[in-house]
Image (tube, grey):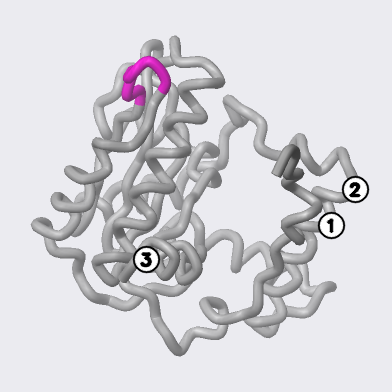
């Protein structure tokens, strides 16, 4: 698989097969991802990857705990209509694929609640870093995560980025033995093999036309 194929075939998977992720494969991916770019070579990212019974134990704690107040805000873009419409577009595609009506609030909440168990993924990466890291280092962590997602595709694996997990930052830090004062919990990343037959993994996604995002000057 070349880079273009990895980029265009990557998507947020919300239904995984019950197929374990081999340790040698995930280790190979993470070892390559160390070469992701970072400003000043700080390499700010840290992570813990959990599978098997420990993952089930952590998910039991998450599902039995009320969500907490978020330590950072990912909803701010909804203040502008253009971004709000992009969110609505992807949500509409997802819920239509799941056969959930717009006015079925209970079913929508149940579908979103599957984030807590990472949509049945056999492995989940919990991403964290020291609180002293600022916006540039958050950006670097995003580049690292994107690199991992593409390397997973190269191995035939899939993923789903889960900022939703930030609702359970305290539970996750406790379970992983992370210092609450030092450590900022960022997100989860579901890892596994996609269910190719699941409609939620196959609905059409939209992307903004290139000319709305990029200008070319001097060419």
Q: Which mark is residue 158?
A: 3
State the CA–CA distance, disc 2 to disc 3: 31 Å
Is there CB contact under 8 Å for labels 1 and 2? yes
State the CA–CA distance, disc 1 to disc 3: 26 Å
Asked if 129 appears above or below 81 in the picture, the reply is: above
40 part of magenta stretch: yes
- Name the secondary structure under disc 3: strand
Q: Position of residue 185 (x, y in %)?
A: 43, 29
- Name the secondary structure under disc 2: helix
83 part of magenta stretch: no
Is there CB contact under 8 Å for labels 2 and 3? no
* Residue linked to disc 2: 81
- Name the secondary structure under disc 1: helix
Asked if 95 appears above or below 69 in the picture, the reply is: below
| Crowd class of label 3 (few under 14; some 14 to 19; many from 20; radius 10 Å) | many
Q: Position of residue 160 (x, y in %)?
A: 45, 58
Asked if residue 182 can be seen in this view, the reply is yes
Stretch of the chain drawn in magenta: 39-44
| Crowd class of label 2 (few under 14; some 14 to 19; many from 20; radius 10 Å) | few
Q: Which mark is residue 85?
A: 1
Q: Residue at x 65, y 78 (%)?
A: 204
Q: Within the image, what quadrant is residue 3 found in?
A: bottom left
Instruction: Tell me the quadrant of the picture where the N terminus can be found.
Output: bottom left
């Amino acid at each position: 698989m070349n880079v273009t194929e990895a980029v265009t075939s990557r998507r947020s998977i919300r239904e995984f097969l019950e197929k374990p992720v081999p340790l040698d494969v995930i280790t190979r991916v993470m070892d390559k991802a160390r070469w992701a770019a970072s400003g000043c070579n700080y390499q700010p990212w840290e992570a813990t990857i959990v599978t098997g019974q420990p993952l089930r134990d952590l998910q039991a704690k998450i599902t039995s705990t009320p969500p907490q107040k978020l330590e950072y805000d990912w909803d701010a873009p909804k203040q502008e209509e253009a971004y709000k419409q992009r969110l609505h577009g992807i949500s509409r595609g997802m819920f239509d694929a799941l056969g959930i009506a717009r006015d079925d609030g209970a079913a929508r909440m149940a579908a979103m609640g599957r984030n807590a168990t990472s949509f049945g993924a056999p492995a989940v990466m919990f991403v964290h870093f020291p609180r002293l890291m600022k916006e540039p280092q958050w950006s670097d962590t995003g580049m690292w995560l994107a690199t991992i997602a593409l390397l997973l595709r190269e191995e035939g694996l899939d993923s789903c980025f889960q900022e939703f997990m930030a609702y359970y930052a305290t539970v996750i830090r406790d379970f992983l033995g992370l210092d609450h004062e030092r450590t900022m919990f960022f997100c989860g990343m579901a890892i596994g093999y996609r269910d190719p037959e699941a409609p939620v993994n196959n609905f059409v996604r939209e992307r903004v036309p290139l000319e709305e995002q990029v200008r070319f000057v001097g060419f």
